[in-house]
Image: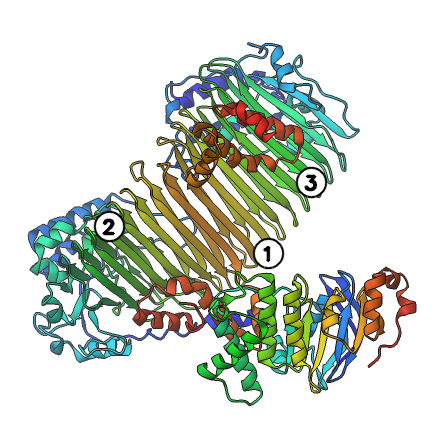
Amino acid sequence: MSQVEIWQDQYRVRAQGLPGATLPWLVTLRERAMERFVAMGWPTRRKEDWHHTSLAFLEGQTFKVPMRGAAPPEESLMGRLREGGAGHWLVFVNGWFNAALSQIGSLPEGATVDTMPQALIGHAERVEAHYGSAEDGGSPAALNAALATDGAYVHLARGVAVEAPIHLVFIATIAEGASHVRNLVIAEDGAEATLVEHYLGTSATATLTNAVTRIHAGADSRITHLKLQQEAEQALHLASIDTQQGRGSVFNSHSLSFGARLARNDITTRFAGEHCETLFNGMYHVDGKRHVDHHTVIDHALPHGVSREYYRGILDGSARGVFSGRIKVAPGAVKSDAMQRADSLLLSRQAEADARPELEIYAADVKCAHGATVGQIDDDSLFYLRARGMDEAHARNLLTYAFAAEALARIGVAPLRNRARAALLARLPGGHLLEELTS
Amino acid sequence: MLDINDLRVSVDGKPILNGLSLHVKAGEVHAIMGPNGSGKSTLAQVLAGRDSFQVDGGTVTYDGEDLLTQPAEVRARAGVFLAFQYPVEIPGVSNAYFLKAAVNAVRRHRGLQELDAMDFLKRVKSEMKAVGMKEEFLYRSVNEGFSGGEKKRNEVLQMTLLEPKLAVLDETDSGLDIDALKVVADGVNRLRAPDRALIVITHYQRLLDYIVPDYVHVLANGTIVRSGGPELAAELEERGYAWLAKAPEEQAKGVTT
Amino acid sequence: MNAATKNIDSFLDREYSAGFVTDLESDSLPKGLSEATVRAISAKKHEPAFMLEWRLEAYRHWLTMTPPHWAQVGFPAIDFQDIVYYAAPKQKKDGPRSLDEVDPELLRTYEKLGVPLHERARLAGVVAVDAVFDSVSVGTTFQKQLAEKGIIFCSFSEAVREHPDLVRQYLGSVVPPGDNFYAALNSAVFSDGSFVYIPKGVRCPMELSTYFRINAQDTGQFERTLIIADEGAHVSYLEGCTAPMRDENQLHAAVVELVALKDARIKYSTVQNWYPGDKDGKGGIYNFVTKRGDCRGDRSHISWTQVETGSAITWKYPSVVLRGDDSVGEFYSVALTNNRQQADTGSKMTHMGRNTRSTIISKGISAGHGSNTFRGLVKVTPKAENARNYTQCDSLLIGEQCAAHTFPTIEAGNPSARVEHEATTSRIGEDQLFYAMQRGLSAEDAVSMIVSGFCKEVFKELPMEFAVEAQNLLGVSLEGSIG
């Protein structure tokens, strides 16, 4: 079976059992989205957006959407993850919500944290208004729109602030299992929240995660989003995060990627009001044959927007890191202020880094700059550390850590920063030796 | 020479100067002091012709002519000089070229013969010595990579070369060490003349130890709340601004001329 | 918009002084393109069989290709059957044997354009000129003096006849006929251009230059330039171009190939001033050019410098393939787009040898409704040890309706590579204007000064001869920029 046939088949079998299968708008949307995926298939390298990332290896690979409740992870996993940390935890296993592993703490009035199937029952109109369309994004997003089984629903009424982070944990445990999850975050004017999407995998064979998160940040709202991607070596991870920002809103996105055979992140924000601010902060460390690709778009559609983007990639082994960041300034979006940096560190002969920072500017009164570098560990620094008695491997690790630390420092929420830091140290050979140096 | 009457200025609809009046005669040195945000720099920029400010009312006459309708370069040629608080960098344009172009633009306007390269260099080099600038600064881009002190010296150098009739120094002392401060003050003092007026804007009394003003004005909330002689500066140094800001109406008296 | 910026647009509005038409009878092929057209061009030039075969192969390949689409460039589809592929000023005999026989009307045209077709030394130094008028070269100066050193500088047609072995060896070796749509088209129908060969160890004693002029209506110009610097040879080559003002768009699709062998140095400078169209974007040249240099030998050095002020649409990426160890590639560019002009330009540097270095400095100025796009690729192949690249790409925005885009790509496949890219986009600084005006400068002088400062890193790479022309075109003074 071809890839398209596999998914057509899955759609035929599963469509009836998807949440909201009685809602006409959703059924129509799914039909249309499936048609769109069938017409396009998986993206090929001929598409400019996918020039450096190939999905050709998918040919011959079968996936299926697992049943709810299949192959739960061991109970202790959540304990280890949570480490007693505060907050709200929604856990999804193979694309389905797992109530036993989840725990939602007390929320202020006006805050709703629930699953998408529940929201489709209780808040169908609001979901419909913000769900997105079959035409959004590329073909993976279309497939998600057709097949999404579950996901989180967060609604914050005007002025409501949720202090503790809302954690969404996605775990892939089944070989050849495909998780299509769709999360929706609606923050009304002045609302405030921090969201974490954490992707994990325990299966040693291929899994597919195809996630879509849509965020509506109302006027003057403040949303922080952190994505931690730590899946297994054979995992395929496709994810898009789409944000619409209202006037005066602040959206901070942090994306940390460590795993998967192939991880592709499409992160987009659009300034739908004036005076928006955004921070795109990213860091990835990959080795082996892993491949990490970030495609970001910051759309200064209206005046007085400020954006800052920093991506740092560390490539070891035969890994490949791709960064493509586009800053768009629409006609009339005066006083836009955009700054972007993308730096890559190559640690091995077989590793490759591709960077494509783009400025697309249609307004005159703007200030935009970008910079990109690719290099290796600085010899002088290495020598300096060795001259102080550090062995070379350790010195290299320290300098690698230092390269990434700048990205970690931008994560404002301390527990999240520490979590990210731990994830990084776990990846560095001899990382444990660095803990005392850096804590 | 300069008469400011009831000047009201705003930026993006936010009022900055609220009916400010000030009268400066030739030969006088006025100091304007005030807390941050009181409108000192706005006043300086409006006098020099910056058009990002909205003049909502009032008049400014300079040598009997309406100053506010004139573009910046016409004011400059007529002798209004602003020493910038933050001198601007112009990459790729040498200081020498910039200075020469400015000097000759002003000379043309005054009906003087333009300086040729030789005369100009002779003149500029001797002035640079006076303000303690190395000759290499002539061949570097305007203000690019200059330290704070070097930029301020460059401003004083320009002022000396352009021989203004009315010089406005906008916090020229900020960020300077004591040696640089002396150089700046020295440059200003050399410029004092019966046909020339100076407005010295500063946050600190320190500069006024070296440039002794004839009058001191205190600016708060966009208007002059108190005027006096040099002793007022000392009083401010001792008591700060708070006591003035509290009752601006009471304190505001007719401004001496 | 304040008073100062209002003056800026007028500052950039210069008359196009090269827009006149020379009244000459011309010998042209009818409009349209077919295998017969290709054969006719080859026959008119009395080409050897291998050349015709090469053209036909390119033509057949071209038929299989589709015109490229560029996201940031917009123009109506070109009707390739509505173009005249060959037009030459009518000649009495087989063509002029020497410059004395060239039609005086033609000589006057070049005189008017400021291009000397006589062999008197000019103030700025000696420059040898090959003058290409529509589809043919009408004369080449200083050939004799150059030949004494073994240097071949002639029209491409002459090279095909007189030096077929060199042409055969190098033609298409840098830009293969099937490289891209317009390169294939050019390979099929190119009519003339310049050919340069500098023998081993020879430093060319004068600047070589080609002046391209499109004159005839409805005519496309498809020229081919091939420069070979043999081991240790040095050459500096200049290229200029203008066209009359016409309401129709005209196509110019050139291919330039540079080959630098061991220790050779080629410096290639362009001042491109094709007719840009009028204020509303009517008329103007479509300038779709493939330029590539091959640093084939160790320690070879190729440098591109361009000042692009003309053309309705410019599409070109002068590139360097850094094959030899320790070879160096450079690209310096100023591109000004005003009114409705669109420029899509940049450079590709492909690092293959060890210790190769490349520099890209691009300055884009967008005014009016102009659109300026920088597209770059720096590729470090896995075997390219210690490759270094520095790219700097600045855009200056003038006026309210313009656009500036920057699309660089870095592909680094060797950990010893160090690749740096910096780009800025900013409006012409209001602070800078105010500062200069506060010192008494007029708005126009202030802008001129700031623009020349913005471009100085590129201007300093131009030979003196061209620097003067460039500053006239941009209306800026070089006096203030630091050299």
Residue C309: where, in percent of width, then height? 38, 65
The quarter of the picture where residue A282 lies is top right
Say whether mark 1 and mark 3 are on the same chain.
Answer: yes
x and y percentages locating residue C355 in the rendered image: 30, 44
Q: Pinpoint residue A426: horizontal percent, then vertical percent.
A: 53, 23
Q: Secondary structure at mark 1?
A: loop
Kindly state the secondary structure of the residue where label 3 is placed.
loop
Compared to residue C239, the image places residue A382 above or below, namely: above
Judge by depth and name the residue closer to the eye, C104 or A86: A86
Mark 1 Cα within 10 Å, few/some/many (few <14, many 20+)?
many
In whole angstroms, how far apart are the C-alphas of marks 3 and 1? 21 Å
Identified at 16% across, 55% down, the residue is: C230
Residue type at mark 1: give it.
Val
What residue sits right under mark 1 in the picture?
A: A334
Label 1: chain letter: A
Q: Is residue B198 left or right of residue A427?
A: right
**Residue extending furthest right?**
B250
Q: Which residue is mark 2?
A: C299
- Is residue C278 visible in the rendered image? The answer is yes
